[in-house]
Image (spheres, helix red, strand yellow):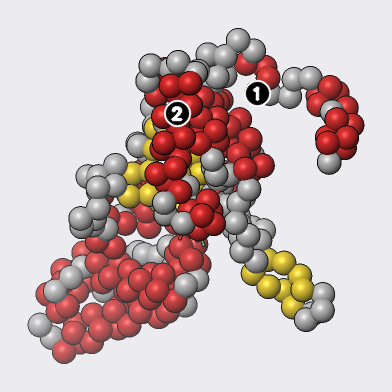
Amino acid sequence: MSEQMVSAVREAASYIEQRAEAEADGPVSLKELSDHTGISPWHLQRQFKRVLGVSPRQYDDALRMKRLRKGLKSGVGVAGATFEAGYGSSSRVYERAAAALGVQVHGADAIELNVYVLPLDPRQDGASIERDTVLMVQAVRRAVKVPVAVKLSPFYTAFASLARQLDAAGADGLVLFNRLFQPDVDPEALEVRPALQLSAPSELPLRLRWLALLAGQVRAGLAASGGVHSAVDVVRALMAGADVVQVVSALLLHGPDHLAGLRAGLSAWLEEHEYASLDQLRGSLSAARCPEPEAWGRANYMLVLRSWRTLARHA
Ligand SMILES: Cc1cc2nc3c(=O)[nH]c(=O)nc-3n(C[C@H](O)[C@H](O)[C@H](O)COP(=O)(O)O)c2cc1C
């Protein structure tokens, strides 16, 4: 091979590197490389592989994947790392995530994807955020053999629609809901501080509504997370439509032994109320099965508003 051809290949490789470095949307096309080096696309493709052992496309891809891994490690988030690597949209990364990022599960019986999206970039619209989430779940579902649960926040415009899309994408479980930590203002210290607050049972009804609306409507199992503190809370979540419950704050407050108390309390409740099994309880008050499904919607709004007087009397 002539010196001239080797230097043209090196020139093409350096052009690809510059484009990746500039975070330009990739990959660089063969036509662009051909225009840049003055060598025909077909010839350049063959000579590139002979000199560097990979095609221009593979070379470009390897560079961008390296940048992506670096970005992910630096903590800029998936969207930021994707942009920095020049992938344009996360969906293109998710499509090849399994092979490119080497997603593997060792030893775990299942995994839970915690979708913690805080869309601070005003250029990102709701539909693209949801699409990215669905594609991510699809990619992970294809890449691993163990069951995949998806934990979501309630802050989506049409939660039922997203839940159905994730169900169709192969999610084995949906966990309702994540609690996003909210920063707080300390007026004395003049500081914005991250604030951790443990949950309270008053947070459970938001979960109950969506569990009740989704129960029987999706193939995925449903988990309640957020506000489950007592055995009666477990009963409430199961009745609404949860298959299982998750408990964190109550265990932090009362210690790990609280779990045994919850199980014993649940058994006692079932016995006292003459339920033969948990299955009899599960979903018995879901929207599809309860006598008044409209109660899960916005029914009796004026009546609800007026009930503040009773609350005030008991306060
Ligand atoms: C100290 C603390 C750490 C947490 N860390 C995580 C985490 O790493 N990943 C996650 O998905 N949720 C995390 N969560 C959220 C919990 O898994 C759970 O969704 C939330 O606390 C609501 O459930 P709870 O009412 O039982 O506490 C954390 C919660 C607390 C209190």
Please state which of residues 249 and 194 is positioned toward the viewer in this rendering: 249
Image: 17 above or below 109: below
Is disc 2 surrounded by few (<14), some (14 to 19) or many (20+) residues within 10 Å?
A: few
Question: Is 81 above or below relative to 125?
Answer: below
| Residue nearest the observer in this picture, 279 or 88 | 279
Residue farthest to the top, as pictured = 291
Q: Position of residue 231 (x, y in %)?
A: 50, 36
Tag count = 2
Between disc 2 and disc 1, whose residue precedes? 2
Q: Residue at horizontal 18%, vertical 84%?
A: 6
Circle 1 SS class: helix
Residue 4, can we see it? yes
Disc ID at residue 24? none
The span from disc 2 to disc 1 (Cα, nearest Å) is: 28 Å
Considering depth in this image, is 242 or 94 the residue closer to the camera? 242
Residue on which disc 1 sits: 296
Q: Secondary structure at mark 2?
A: helix
Residue 170 is situated, as x and y percent measured from the top left of the image, at 35, 36
Left or right placement of residue 249 versus residue 275 in this view: right
- Which residue is denoted by mark 2 in the rendering? 268
Residue at the spot x=27%, y=58% of the render?
103
Taking the spot 84% from the left edge, 22% from the top edge, the residue there is: 303
Q: Amino acid at mark 1?
A: Trp
Q: Position of residue 160 (x, y in %)?
A: 55, 31
